[in-house]
Image (spheres, coloured by chain):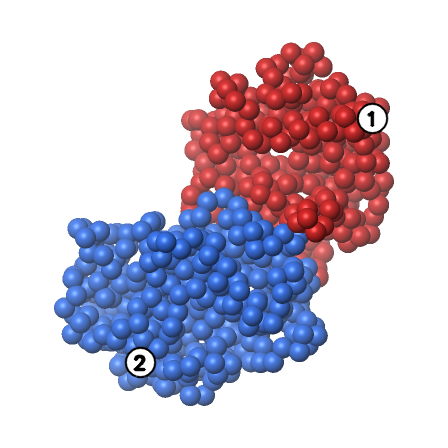
Chain colours: A blue, B red
Amino acid sequence: MRKVAVIGVGLHRYGKWDNITSYSLAKEAIDGALETAGLEWNQIQSGWCGHTGLGITAGARIFMRYGKTGLSITNVENASASGSYAFRGAYLEVALGEFDIALALGIDKRHKSLFKNPRNPNKFRRPSPIIQKFAQDARKHMEKYGTTVDQLAMVSVKNHYNGSLNPYAQFQEEITIEDVHNAPMMDNPLTILHCTSTSDGAAACILASEDMVKKLGISKPVWISASVSKSEFDPKQDSRDITAVTAREAYKKAGIEPSDLGLVELHDAFTIEEISVSELLGLCPIGEGGKLLEEGATAINGRIPINTSGGLLAMGHPIGPTGIGQVSEVYWQMRGEAGKRQIPNPPKYALTQMIGFGGTCLIHIFSR
Amino acid sequence: MRKVAVIGVGLHRYGKWDNITSYSLAKEAIDGALETAGLEWNQIQSGWCGHTGLGITAGARIFMRYGKTGLSITNVENASASGSYAFRGAYLEVALGEFDIALALGIDKRHKSLFKNPRNPNKFRRPSPIIQKFAQDARKHMEKYGTTVDQLAMVSVKNHYNGSLNPYAQFQEEITIEDVHNAPMMDNPLTILHCTSTSDGAAACILASEDMVKKLGISKPVWISASVSKSEFDPKQDSRDITAVTAREAYKKAGIEPSDLGLVELHDAFTIEEISVSELLGLCPIGEGGKLLEEGATAINGRIPINTSGGLLAMGHPIGPTGIGQVSEVYWQMRGEAGKRQIPNPPKYALTQMIGFGGTCLIHIFSR
């Protein structure tokens, strides 16, 4: 197995972009990734496209319009984790030696399709089953562990603060705990500001083999130390949690402990998710995620910053791009290039976690 | 890079299966693959699902209904080559050592969607752009190389004969050259019997690492010697043909010459394709594909049998499954288990070629 690094990233700001074509979104992300890596398009040997709503052969349509160079093209889809799986596909090929340089693209136009937009209450006269599920999770967590509504709201406040520092975020306005409490109620205790918003966007990463990193003279590559993919277990036979199991295997592969992490980008489609996932990743004991947050440990200048990008709550959730957007944040933070939201000591290790609706989980660990 | 073998295959017969659910189609293919390999579902560590029309998270819905074992799940789509790319994904993971046993599933219900059904002339009052393109290719080939309409028709006759010997084929009736000539004309010189039919179906393969092949005591594994993926070149800058380039790289990786092949399963959506692809794969000089066929070289008992399964023309073309159906045929033929259509000397090397509409090409080479 060859070592593989991320050597370039690019994004189109997430948002509602009715008048921008999918191709234009993708082009801006690919342009950015190529520019960061200092590469030309004809040096890309393989392109993976993660999307959920652009129809068949989306990757071929985008990549071949960008330039017909003969590169390998593969489309992948795993709901919210589509971009993450595109990234994993590119990683597999480069690690195996099939290619030296590969690109992963996440692209979607989702602000008015697939999932109803939880930021638009008119679309939610009745709470959707997804929100009901997470509202129930929140109520259970509060009852069992004493997590408070304030703590849940503080996830959104923190992530919106981070988003206010991220030029690619859909939501760049700070909010207060009161704002969260006073927003329209979706399903108790989750108001609309506890929920992500689906959006439009694009994100791209370029991956390269160790030999190619040297050959190209890339400074500060961000290495991929683990890529672990799982799906849910049958609760009747196996009570293990998919995220906890995936994380343990990823830590083992990367040879690190949770305490080594300096950044975690995780799937915060709902505030309760950030709290429970922080526990399942081993960042704190089970039940203490609310406390971890309230202590400030997960803030940009905390012990273990979470979702410095703004996360799904504030950076936004265009679905296909989301997982690659997480990698972009890791890339910038590890290289000390995250601008106003830079973690004071750029992380030595970082983790990205994405859940695909329907039961898949993908975790990547990065090192520098 | 680890050696990877195909150790089990399963199919649901291709056809028009209005009253059979996607899950039932998939289950029959997975059941067959597990039975052939002598494995239980909980031994499958990763599942790749290639499809074009089952909506998001199709693989998760199918695999997790089959059994929630925690296996990794990835959906891929590359038009007609979707199944082939699912196979490649499983291959990449096993070759890299991410998993020891992986399953690739191709599944679709396409007999009345996506492409109009060329076997139902009522649906084609005007020829579709795809048929027009291949009819033009046929006319050019005839004009430039003297290929005859009889030779084109003989592709369909041969493949329908092969299909008549394949219990999984959609079309199991022999036809004559006259039948082909007298069938409804789609676009000169292609009558409807020169064209494939989209269909419903499922196909599954199980792949395992060399160590696992030994551990399981698998007899007669079919090894994967090359997996090469490309997309089209810009005709203004690069006149190379995608299939020819992909094939050359695959031969090099496998360390063989075209003359070493004992079986080729290729993308014969139209009769002209089988003739031109046989040339591009180097099975005969350019322009002599018609002659190669007329001499009987591509028949089951010929020098280089092509599409012994019946190919897309007679086995059918459910899209997602098609590429994995090709691998199944290779598996049976190499193991001497192809029944009435068995090649007298089971091939030592075989090749599968699939084109994904939109410009992708994927070639696999197998050895025993």
Judge left or right: residue B132 versus residue A244. Answer: right
Mark 2 residue crowding within 10 angstroms, few (<14) / some (14–19) / many (20+): many
Mark 1 residue crowding within 10 angstroms, few (<14) / some (14–19) / many (20+): some
Residue A299 seen in render? yes
Where in the figure is residue B183, as x and y percent of width and height? 62, 14
At x 61%, y 80%, the residue is A219
Query: Which one is in front, A189 or B179?
Result: B179
**Of the residues shown, which amino acid type is indicated by label 1?**
Lys
At x 42%, y 49%, the residue is A53
Judge left or right: residue A295 versus residue B88. Answer: left
Where in the figure is residue B94, as x and y percent of width and height? 63, 57
Where in the figure is residue A23, as x and y percent of width and height? 48, 54
At x 76%, y 51%, the residue is B249
Query: Which one is in front, A57 or A229?
Result: A57
Chain letter of disc 1 in the image: B
At x 31%, y 80%, the residue is A292
How far apart in space, not on screen, are marks 1 and 2 (Cα)?
Answer: 75 Å
Chain letter of disc 2 in the image: A
Query: Which one is in front, B283 or B141?
Result: B141
Quadrant location of the N terminus of chain A in the rendered image = bottom right
Judge left or right: residue A213 versus residue A112. Answer: right
Q: Is residue B87 above or below residue A301?
A: above
Query: Which one is in front, B238 or B325?
Result: B238
**Of the residues shown, which amino acid type is indicated by label 2?**
Leu
Residue that mark 1 sits on = B291
- Name the image quarter holding residue B281: top right
CB contact under 8 Å: marks 1 and 2: no
Residue that mark 2 sits on = A292
Q: Nearer the viewer, mark 1 or mark 2?
A: 1
Where in the figure is residue B207, as x and y percent of width and height? 63, 49
Quadrant location of the C terminus of chain A in the rendered image = bottom right
Give the mark count.
Answer: 2
